[in-house]
Amino acid sequence: MKRFIDYHLTTWSTQKSFKPLLLRGARQVGKTYAVRQLGKKFDSFIEINFELNQKARSIFAQDFHPDRIVKEIGYLTNQEIIPGKTLLFFDEVQAEPHAIQALRYFYEMMPGLHVIAAGSLLDFAIDLVGIPVGRVDFLYMYPMSFLEFLYALKELILFRAILQHDIQQPISVIAHERLLQLVKEYLVIGGMPEVVNCWSLEKSAATCFKIQQQLITAYRQDFNKYAKKNQIKYVDLVFDNIPRQLGKKFKFSAMPGEFRKRELSPCIDLLVTAGVVHKVYHTAAQGLPLGGQIDVDDFKLVFLDVALAQSALGLDISQDLLSFEQPWINKGEIVEAFIGQEMLAYSNPTIKQQLYYWASSERSSQAEIDYVAVIKQAVLPIEVKAGVGSTLKSMHQFLQKHPQSKSGLRFSAQNYHVYENIHSYPLYAVSVAIESESVKNI
C-alpha cells in the first residue's frame, strides 16, 4: 500500500549525508511494512527482530562498536553488510534498548551504513536509555490518512481530484457526494493498514470488525509491558473511557468509580507515550508558539484511529455501514476526531506534532474552537461540523478576541466555499487546507 512516509524514507536513504533513523509510531500503523518496502531499493536488506531473536540481543551486551556488531550480525544472518548497499533494520528495538544507544556509534564510526530502528513501544525504550542527541534522525508514523485510504481502494480518479482541484471553486456535485460517502466509510473502517487492506480486498465488514477487535486486544496486552502491576487496572479503565469522552474536555470526575486524578493521570501519559491516544491541549492561542500558552490540566483525548475508538465501544461496523443514509447528527465527536487524525497524518513527520483547541475563559460564553493550528506562520481557528454547519458563532468570537488571526477554516459536509474571512473545505480536503508537504511530493 502506498504511504506518504515512503517519500520521506526514500529522501533519507538517498541523501549524501544521513544519520541512523528512528521510526516512531503506535503498534500496527505500518512501520515494518514501510521499511521493508524501502529495503527493496537496496542491494541487500537485513531485518533483525529483537523480540523474536534472542541471539541478536546478546550482540549488544559486549560493547557498541559498529565493526564488531556488523560482523556478528553477518555471522547470524549469513549476509554480508556493505555500507551504501545494505539497509540494516532493527525492529521491535524496545526489546534491546542498547541497540538504540549503539546508533550513536554507527553515525560516528560507520556513517555510510543505512540503519533504521523501529518498535511498537519504542518511546518507552527511549525514556529508559535516552536518545543519542544529534546522532539520529526521526520520522513519525500514524494510521493511514483518508487520501491513503482512497489510494488503497483504487479510487485514483477521486484521489487526484482532491489534489488537483481549484479550491476557489466548488467541486463537481457527483464527486463531492461520492467523496463524502467514502469519508463515512473511512469513519467505520479507519486507517489501520491491516483493516484497510482487508476492506479493499474483501469488502467484508464482519472481517474488518474482527481485525479491529484483535488490534484493541493487542493494545490491551501491551499494558503489561509498560504499566506497573498496580497501574494496569487504571490504564484499562482510562482506555475504556476515552472513546466515551471524545470531543469533550477530559474529566476525571466522569470516570466510573471513586478514583483520584493522581492515580489516573499517569496512566493517560502511558497511553500517550504508547501512541494509542493523543492529547489535544487547550491553548490561549494569542501567538506563537501555541505550546507556550497551554493549560496542562485542560485537554481532550482522541484515539489514534477513529474506527478503533468506535470498535472499542463495541460498535458493530457491519450495522453502522448499513446506516450510511442516516443523518450525521450523532457523529459530531467522531468527525471532530477524524479531522484531528487527518491533521496528524499530513503533518511534517520529522517533528512530533501536538494538537490544540481553544475555549473561551469567560463563564458567560460557551465558545469553543475544535482545533487551532499554525499554517504558514499564521494562527488559524478550525471548526468541524459533521453536517453542513451553518452557524459559526465560536469562530467569529475567536477572531474577534484574536486580531492577529485574520481568517479561519471550517471542515464540513459543504462543498468548497469562501465567505468573507472563513474558508470552508469539505471533510475530505484536510490535506489541501493545511498545505501538507508530504502530499505535495507524492
Image: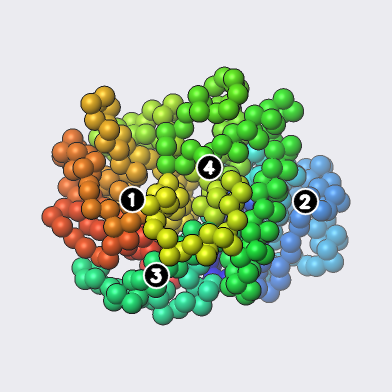
Residue 243: assigned label: 4
Give the crowd class for mark 3: few <14, some 14-19, many >=20 residues within 10 Å. many
Residue at 43% across / 51% down in the picture? Answer: 331
Residue at 28% across / 27% down in the picture? Answer: 361
Q: Is label 4 in a helix, a strand or a loop?
A: helix
Q: What separation in Å lies between label 1 and label 3 (alpha carbons)?
A: 17 Å
- Residue 441 appears in the picture as rendered: no
Q: Nearer the viewer, residue 251 or 291?
A: 251
Q: How many marks?
A: 4
Residue type, label 3: Leu
Q: What separation in Å lies between label 3 and label 2 (alpha carbons)?
A: 42 Å
Residue to which mark 1 is pinned: 384
Residue to which mark 3 is pinned: 179
Counting residues from the start of the chain, the first of labels 3 and 4 encountered is: 3
Give left or right: position of 420 versus 194: left
Q: Position of residue 258 (x, y in %)?
A: 59, 20
Residue 67, picture quadrant: bottom right
Q: Is label 2 in a helix, a strand or a loop?
A: loop
Residue at 70% across / 48% down in the picture? Answer: 217
Counting residues from the start of the chain, the first of labels 4 and 1 encountered is: 4
Q: What separation in Å lies between label 4 and label 1 (alpha carbons)?
A: 18 Å
Do the numbered discs 1 and 3 sit on residues whose CB atoms are within 8 Å? no
